[in-house]
Structures are given as C-alpha cells and as structure tokens.
Amino acid sequence: METVLHISNACPRSDAFRFESPLNWTLKKKEHWAILGPNGGGKTVFSTVLSGKIPLKEGLITYCFQDNKPLYEQIKCATFQHIYSLADYKNMYYQQRWHATEAESPVVGDILNESGDKAIIAEYVSVFGIENLLDKKLILLSSGELRKFLIIRILLSNPTVLVLDNPYIGLDAESRDLLNELLLRIAGKEGLQIILLLSDPDDIPSFITHVLPVKNKKLLPACTREVFLKNTALLRELFPPYTPCCGVEKLPFREIQRENAQSIDKLSYTNAIEMKNIHIQYGNSIILNNLTWTIKKGEKWALLGPNGAGKSTLLSLVCADNPQGYANTFYLFDKKRGSGESIWDIKKRIGYISPEVHLYFHSPQTNLQIVGSGFFDSIGLYRKCNENQIAIARKWMSVFGIEHLADKPFMQLSFGEQRLVILARAFVKSPDLLILDEPLHGLDRCNKKKVIAIIENFCLETNATLIYVTHYLNEIPECINKQFQMNLKVEVKLP
C-alpha cells in the first residue's frame, strides 16, 4: 500500500507543541483515521504538525503526493478556529448578526459557486441537505449552519488529505446522519484520505479504518477501528469513568454566591422571562412569529429544535443582543424590556454560553482574564478585576478543573479546554439566569459528566433559573423537567 504521508521522529521547535516523545506515524492510501483522545491530549497539535504548519527542531515529515500543488492545498483542515479565516468574521463584533442594517455579508450560494464545479456543489449541497442555506447571508447563519457551510466549502477545495476537527458538534441528529452519508461517499473517492479529530469514541463513523489514540501529549499504539472499539481497557484509560468522588457535589456554590453579592445584588422576581406573541423579521423574511413563552423563577427548561429553527434568535432577545426585543412584548425579571434599563443591567443577571459567543473569543489574553470578563459581560477583559473577583474567578476555574490553565493564553488551548474556560466565565457571577447553549460542545466523556454534575448541583443549591440547549437528548441534566420545542419551518418570505 503506497504511503501518502510519513512522520519520522518529529520534534516541534516550540516547547508548547512538543509531545512526550518524537512523533512517528504513517498515512497510507485508502486509509481513513480517527485521532481520538481526551480534551487537551494533543489531537489538534498533532494535526497541525502533520500539516506542516509547525517548524521542527528534529525529524522529518515526508509527503508523497502525486501532483505538485502546494502543501496548503494538499492538506486542508476544518476546525472551529478556521471560521476566523472567513473574511466576513475578521472584523465583526458579536451583536452584529442581530443588527439587520449592519449585517452586510455575502450570500452562502455565491461563496460556494466561487469555490468549485457547480455539479459537485449541487451534489454536496443535496446530500448534506443545505439547499435552504443558499440564499442566506453568511453572517446570519446559526452555529450549526455555519459548520455545514464550512465543511462543504473545504470539501470543494479538493484536498488530498482532509482533516475535520470534531465535525459533528453543533449538528442536530438528522444533520449528523447526513454528514456521515456525505463523508462515506467521499471516502470512497480515489486519492482522498480523511482524518477526524474526535473526543468521543461514539462519534467514530463506519468508514474509519484506523484509530490513533492520543493522551497527555503522547501517541498510544495505533490499531484498526474494530480492534480499538473492542479494547475496553484502552477506552477506560483514555476516558476514565466519572465518579462523584471528584468532589463536585460538595463545592461551595452558596459560599461563592455570598462572596459575589457585593458585586451583584440579587433580585426578587416571579418570572425570569415572559414573552408574548414574539415576532422577529429581517427584511422580507420572518424568523419567529407569534411565539409565547413564560419561564418562572427557578424553573429548569430544555430548549430543543433542529439547526436553523430560530433558537439563537430567541436567545439573542433574552440576552439583550437583539434590538428587536424593543419592538415586542417581552419581560425579563418582571421588568418590561425597553423601560429604561441598559443592556448591561440585563446581562449582569445572566450567565451565558453559546457557540456564537465562543466564536468571538480570539484574543491573546490569559484564561483567568477570559473568566474574569464574565463579571463585565465583555468578549475579552477590558476592565481590571478587583481582588475579590480574581479570587472568585480562580475558584470557578478550580470547579471546572482548569485552574492549572489560569495563566496560559486562551488561544493556545484545545477547543474542549476553551469550552471549559468559557463555561467558568458563564458561572462566575453566580447568575440568576443560566443560559447554556450547547455547553458540552467538544468535551470528552469525563468532562461532559463533570459539567452536567456542576450544572445540576449549582441549580439545586442556588435555585437558579436554567435554559439548556442541546441536540443530544441523552445529555440533558436530570434537574430539567420542562421542554420548549422549536420546529424547523420553511422560512416565510413576504412579497
């Protein structure tokens, strides 16, 4: 079997990217690999090494490609951070998506038509079922829709090696099935190798031939997919079972809440949210119509619905990011929206995490600074935290098991580690209302169970109100006993 890529005793020049021992690995034709391991294990770093983007101190990477295209065209990586490469996102601010007059952006179909053969575009679009996205502006896509677009766009570049970092997160169940169908189809294409970076063994699709386990910046022995899935000892080593002895159940949430009281006064209210006949429209397109929802203090809700159903738009009203909140009958903490409060008065009562929020964190600040920014509801820290706030931020980092990352730059973390940092940021104020939109994105098995335990115990001890958004019903915390279902409708376009 012919070799496509061979890594021989590779040692990155920078200590930040160095593994426990020199890297050795071979990719051969007709092989498709899953690089799999826990958060922070080294999967993303390894993929960056194999793509030739990290200078080597020692060793060699040999590329045996048949044509003479540049390396950056031969190996294509689709990661969460690659969304930054889209020109329209480089200079955007977070709320811009909701300001229709400012949301100048190219249309999805126009971008794709510039990327490749129209017949192939039509095939990929059809198989992935994204025909409804073609007429949308790029800036208006939800996180799941944006991932679909990014995957299609990178497929159209016709790479020799395609690296996809956790491609299933953010996709609803139907979209995950459609993506598998699309990847299965292109996996049979001659001259194309697929490498998936995964944090959950359950995500390994059937077309994968080999698995390379990675943990603690160390490559474990590679094996076939079948052998790996039967190796229960290895699975347990990579993803140790979560047990309550980790101490989450005994964490001093009320104590932290009392320490926080000097920064944020607690409110007395009956309804956290009350929406009546909500109508959201952009130009001639109606997104939400006649939506009514009341959430009482202390209630725990799951907000469900497929990609593009309008969940992000709905939450943008609650978080005061969408100016159309002023044009609707909408109450937060028993106070009518638009009755004199600022958006910061609203935000200081809310702890929020979402894929969209994560997208705009790309500053060189430390993780402690990112967590501390939660006190000011800013994307990055632009005000100095006082000593009490710093102490609270450190306590929350300890709760999520990331205190050792406090002084490390945010952008040097893996996606899963970044997720834990932004989760700590959402909790740092001990908020009255928690809005957790796909909070478990990119987390490995153990971290998922830990975060669910933190959510459940925090809500139990503090009686916080909770809105929890997910596409995985098995990941809904047990404390949730109410559901609000949003259905995907054909977008109404007025004449």
Image (spheres, grey):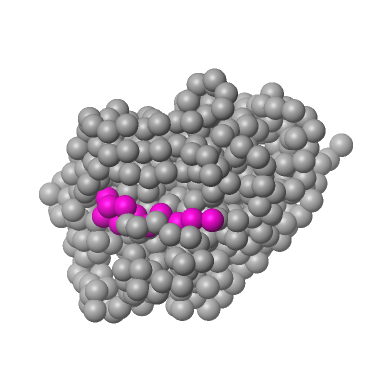
Q: Position of residue 474 (x, y in %)?
A: 53, 73
* Snapshot quadrant of residue 444: bottom left
Q: Is residue 37 magenta?
A: no
Front one among 289 and 245: 245
Q: Position of residue 235 (x, y in %)?
A: 38, 69
**Number of numbered discs visible in the structure rendering:** 0
Res. 276 in view? no
219 in relation to 281, above or below:
below
**For the view shown, which residue lies furthest in the front direction?**
1
Q: Position of residue 378 (x, y in %)?
A: 36, 41
Magenta stretch, residue numbers? 209-219
Front one among 137 and 389: 137
478 in relation to 32, above or below:
below
Front one among 227 and 320: 227
Q: Is residue 213 magenta?
A: yes
Q: Position of residue 162 (x, y in %)?
A: 54, 40
Helix, strand or loop: magenta stretch: strand
State the quadrant of the C terminus. Answer: top right
Q: Residue at x 52, y 34 (%)?
A: 76
